[in-house]
């Protein structure tokens, strides 16, 4: 039997047949379902927040939220976290296949050669106040990059597009590190090409007067794993923003600034900062039952819990929890860990959280690691943004090359006033 859906419109008694492809019907196929009314433009689907609407086809990332599965280009996240590096995973996400040794060498070399930013970028970053949130600085600086690379507008020139992708992946850590150094009043540190991607990032963040910064290999590896875990997550809020803004064919710097702004929110990438603040506010294990009661009464959320797609343990959270212990061996235990562990234990047994399928997400433990590594909470979302840059640009490119995509433009159900005449000021009630 053909994959079709038969719909009877009970308003008219008419029956329609709509094709089902890949488990979906095309919303535009519903337009033909209409009444005799002159103003009926055909049936719409109404789906605030796109809870059950696929907006694209994508071959990058697969999530099974019920089973807690996350694959990049078919490879399980657990295996990538165990065996891969961030740059190798970035190559995979962008190109669809793992690189050969030569391809990885060339790719790593190209990224390393693009880590410097224009000196003028440093200058205008100096204009931000000392207490500017680094995420605000990051978003603005990425947007400003479009003025430094006007060839970024040539989005259908494959070679130029690759150049912007390289620049974005290579320079976001530098911008992030400058934003951090600015916030603590220390001089900016230039990239060190002898170090790995994450090793150099730690260098640009933490180097003081030593001639050569030597990052702790365990911390470099932990940061690399965290970056792998955050590299892509299919059609989340910031990625959809990247695709949405990019669909107007603007340059990728402007689109990525928008995506990073979406990430900044506390319901998305800002959640790990919110988790740390929450753990600090709770203050001690003894205060947890009272806190849980307040959450259940609707007074705030248990940050770092729940997910639109995962209805079981977020596979990234499992890996992060393990990584946390590895980091604490180097840095000493984060004192907030006990509060987090106890919160998790209680929440996983409590009817409120169990019945709503609320489990720890990627943000629940990542902040504890970042804090133990010496990052202030304001930097957490910036770290997420560096790692997610590859996902954003890969999804942006996929969108540009997809012949089914057009400028993003959802419909609405109008609920406002009927047409009426303008009322002069003195005639208004
Ligand atoms: N604490 C307490 N209750 C919650 C929570 C939470 N963290 N999350 C969801 N709920 C409740 C919510 O009140 C609702 O209950 P009810 O049915 O009684 O009204 C039910 O669970 C469903 O929640 P929802 O808001 O409809 O779910 P959503 O899919 O729209 O929201 C979410 C997903 C991630 C925004 C939400 O779970 C949340 O706000 N979590 C806390 C913030 C957070 O940790 N965000 C990071 C997400 S993962 C990384 C990323 O995306 O950047």
Image: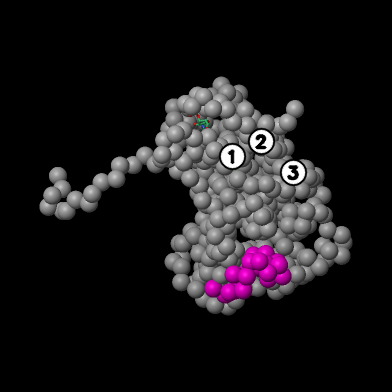
The CA span between labels 1 and 3 is 31 Å
Residue highlighted by disc 3: 71
Front residue of 252/69: it is 252
Q: Secondary structure at mark 2?
A: strand
The residues colored magenta run: 147-168
Vertical order, 188 against 83 (above or below): below
Magenta stretch holds residue 166: yes
Tell whether label 1 touches label 2 (CB within 8 Å): yes
Q: Quadrant of residue 320?
A: top right
Front residue of 243/90: it is 243
Q: Mark 2, residues whose alpha carbon is within 10 Å: few (<14), some, or many (≥20)?
A: some
Pinpoint residue 215: horizontal percent, then vertical percent: 72, 61
Residue lying furthest top: 351
Vertical order, 349 against 171 (above or below): above
Q: Mark 1, residues whose alpha carbon is within 10 Å: few (<14), some, or many (≥20)?
A: some
Left or right, 384 with respect to 123, comes to: right
Tell whether label 3 touches label 2 (CB within 8 Å): no
The CA span between labels 2 and 3 is 29 Å
Residue highlighted by disc 1: 29
């Amino acid at each position: 039997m053909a994959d079709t859906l038969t719909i009877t419109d009970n308003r008219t008694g008419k029956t329609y047949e709509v094709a089902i492809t890949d488990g979906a019907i095309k919303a535009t196929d519903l337009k033909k379902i209409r009444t005799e009314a002159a103003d009926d433009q055909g049936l719409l689907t109404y789906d605030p927040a796109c809870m059950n609407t696929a907006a694209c086809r994508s071959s990058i990332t697969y999530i099974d939220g019920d089973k807690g599965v996350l694959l990049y280009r078919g490879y399980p996240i657990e295996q990538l976290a165990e065996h891969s590096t961030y740059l190798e995973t970035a190559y995979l996400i962008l190109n669809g296949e793992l690189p050969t040794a030569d391809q990885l060498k060339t790719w790593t070399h190209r990224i390393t050669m693009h880590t410097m930013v224009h000196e003028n970028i440093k200058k205008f970053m100096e204009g931000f106040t000392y207490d500017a949130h680094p995420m605000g600085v990051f978003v603005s600086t990425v947007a400003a990059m479009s003025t430094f690379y006007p060839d970024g507008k040539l989005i259908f020139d494959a070679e130029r597009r690759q150049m912007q992708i390289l620049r974005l992946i290579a320079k976001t850590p530098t911008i992030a590190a400058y934003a951090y150094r600015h916030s603590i009043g220390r001089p900016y540190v230039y990239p060190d090409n002898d170090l790995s991607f994450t090793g150099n990032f730690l260098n640009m963040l933490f180097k003081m007067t030593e001639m050569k910064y030597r990052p702790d290999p365990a911390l470099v590896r932990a940061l690399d794993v965290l970056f792998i875990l955050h590299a892509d997550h299919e059609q989340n809020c910031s990625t959809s923003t990247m695709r949405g803004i990019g669909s107007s064919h603007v340059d990728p710097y402007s689109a990525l600034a928008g995506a990073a702004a979406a990430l900044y929110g506390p319901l998305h990438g800002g959640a790990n900062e919110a988790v740390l603040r929450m753990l600090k506010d709770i203050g001690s294990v003894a205060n947890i039952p009272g806190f849980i009661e307040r959450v259940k009464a609707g007074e705030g959320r248990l940050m770092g819990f729940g997910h639109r797609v995962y209805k079981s343990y977020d596979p990234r959270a499992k890996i992060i929890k393990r990584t946390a212990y590895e980091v604490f061996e180097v840095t000493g235990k984060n004192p907030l860990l006990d509060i987090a562990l106890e919160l998790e234990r209680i929440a996983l047994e409590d009817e409120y959280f169990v019945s709503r399928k609320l489990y720890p997400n990627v943000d629940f433990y990542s902040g504890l690691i970042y804090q133990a590594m010496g990052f202030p909470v304001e930097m957490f979302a910036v770290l997420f943004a560096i790692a997610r840059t590859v996902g954003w640009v890969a999804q942006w490119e996929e969108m540009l090359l997809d012949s089914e995509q057009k400028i993003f433009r959802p419909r609405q159900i109008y609920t406002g006033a009927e047409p009426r005449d303008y009322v002069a000021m003195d005639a208004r009630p």
